[in-house]
Amino acid sequence: MTPEARSEKTAAKSPKRQKTAHKLASARRLVVKIGSALLVDDKTGHIHRRWLDALVDDVAELAAAGKEIILVSSGAIAIGRRQLGLTKRAVRLEEKQAAAASGQIRLAHAYQESFARHGLAVAQILLTLDDTEERRRHLNARSTLSTLLRLKTIPVINENDTVATSEIRVGDNDRLAARVTAMIGADTLVLLSDIDGLYTGDPRKDPDAQWVPVVQSLTPEIEAMAGDAPLGYSSGGMKTKLAAARIAHSGGARMVIGDGRRLNPLTALSAGARCTWFLAEVEPRTARKQWIAGSLRPSGRVALDDGALKALRNGKSLLPAGVTGVTGGFQRGDAVLVVDARGREVARGLAAYGAKEARQIIGHNSREIEAILGYRGREELIHRDDLVLTHNL
C-alpha cells in the first residue's frame, strides 16, 4: 500500500478532523517560513520584489481575516554576500556574519516597504538557538512576539547570524520556524519550498517518486524519504523539514510543505494547491499543558488559600493575593509546584516572578505590584496558560 493510500485510509477513520486539517483557512495563528531560494535571485543577489509583494498580499489578506501571522525569513546572507563581493568562493564564518549584517538591512527594508502598501507594521526579531532553549530568554522572546501580535504587527524573524557561532546556531530556518511555532503556541507551520510536498523519493532524480498528501505520524518509513538540499543558497532540504515537523508536532502544531515558487503561494495553498500536510495529534494548548505537567522538574513551590484553590478550579490564573507561602529559589519562567494548605500538590506551573519577588508580593492585590517591586510586571503569579491541574480540587 502506498503512503498516499494509507493516508486516505486513515483519513476515512476520522472525517471530522480531516475536514479542517488540510485547510489553511482553519488556522488561527500561523508561522510562515520563507527560504532564500524563493526570495533572493541566485545570480544577482537581488530580492524578488514581485514575488515578495505577492506573498505580502497573501499575508495581508489573512491578517484582515483575523489570523495572526509570523514570518521566518531567510535571505540576509544571500543578499549581503553580493553586496560585499563574497560570491566567488566559500566564505568563512566571520564573512557569513558580515554578510548577514549587511544583508539584513536591505531585507528588513524590503519587508517594510511591501507591508506599508497595506498599512501594516512589521518588526524585526533576530534569534539564536539559546533564545529558544534558555528558559528566561525563551519567555522574553515569547512575550515580545505575543505583544507584537496583539498590536497587529507582523514579526519577521531570522536567525541572528551576526553573533551566532556553530555552538549556538539552530542551523537552518526550517527548524527555527518550528521552534518559533512551538514557542508562540501557533497551530500551523507553513514551509514554502521549491517543492510541492513530500515524495517517496527525490522527484528530481526518481521519476517513479510518489507524492504523499498527508502524513499522520513521522515513522521511520516517512523519514527515509528525505533527500538532501539542492545546490545554491538553500541550507535545508527535506531532512530539515521533517525535523521541523517533529518539533512542530511536539508543540501541537500541524505543518504543511508547499511550493513557494509561484506568485501568491499562500492563496494557492488555500485554494487547494498540491502540498503535504503533517497532522498534529493534539492542539498547541493541550501539548503545552502536557509538557508542563509531565516534563518539568519543579524548582520550588507556592501554597494557596481556599479562595485561590476555588479560582483555579474555575480556570482562573493564580494571583499573588491568594498565595500564602513561597519556598525554593526559582527564577522567572521556572516550574513550581502549587500546593494546598496541607502541602498536597494540586497543580504545576511556570512562575511569572522569581522566588525573591514572589515573596514580596504574595498576599497583595495585583494593583500593588508596581509599588512593591518598583516596576510593572504581570498581574498573575502564574498565568492560567502556564498552569495545569495535576490533582482534583
Image (spheres, rainbow, N blue to C red):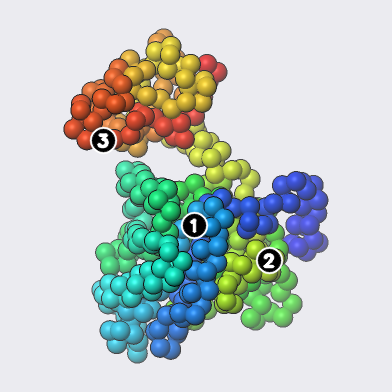
Residue pictured at 33% horizontal, 15% vertical: 324
Residue type (three-letter) at the residue carrying disc 3: Arg
Q: Position of residue 134 (x, y in %)?
A: 34, 47
**What distance separates the C-alpha of mark 3 from that of mark 2?**
46 Å
Residue matched to label 2? 271
Residue matched to label 3? 376
Please, what secondary structure does the residue beneath circle 2 have?
loop
Q: Nearer the viewer, residue 323 or 128?
A: 323
Earlier-in-chain disc, 1 versus 2: 1
Q: Relative to 348, is 92 above or below?
A: below
**Quick check: can you spot residue 275?**
no
Please, what secondary structure does the residue beneath circle 1 have?
strand
**What distance separates the C-alpha of mark 1 from that of mark 3?**
28 Å
Earlier-in-chain disc, 3 versus 2: 2
Residue matched to label 1? 69
Earlier-in-chain disc, 1 versus 3: 1
Residue pictured at 28% horizontal, 84% vertical: 84
Q: Are marks 1 and 2 in contact (CB under 8 Å)?
A: no
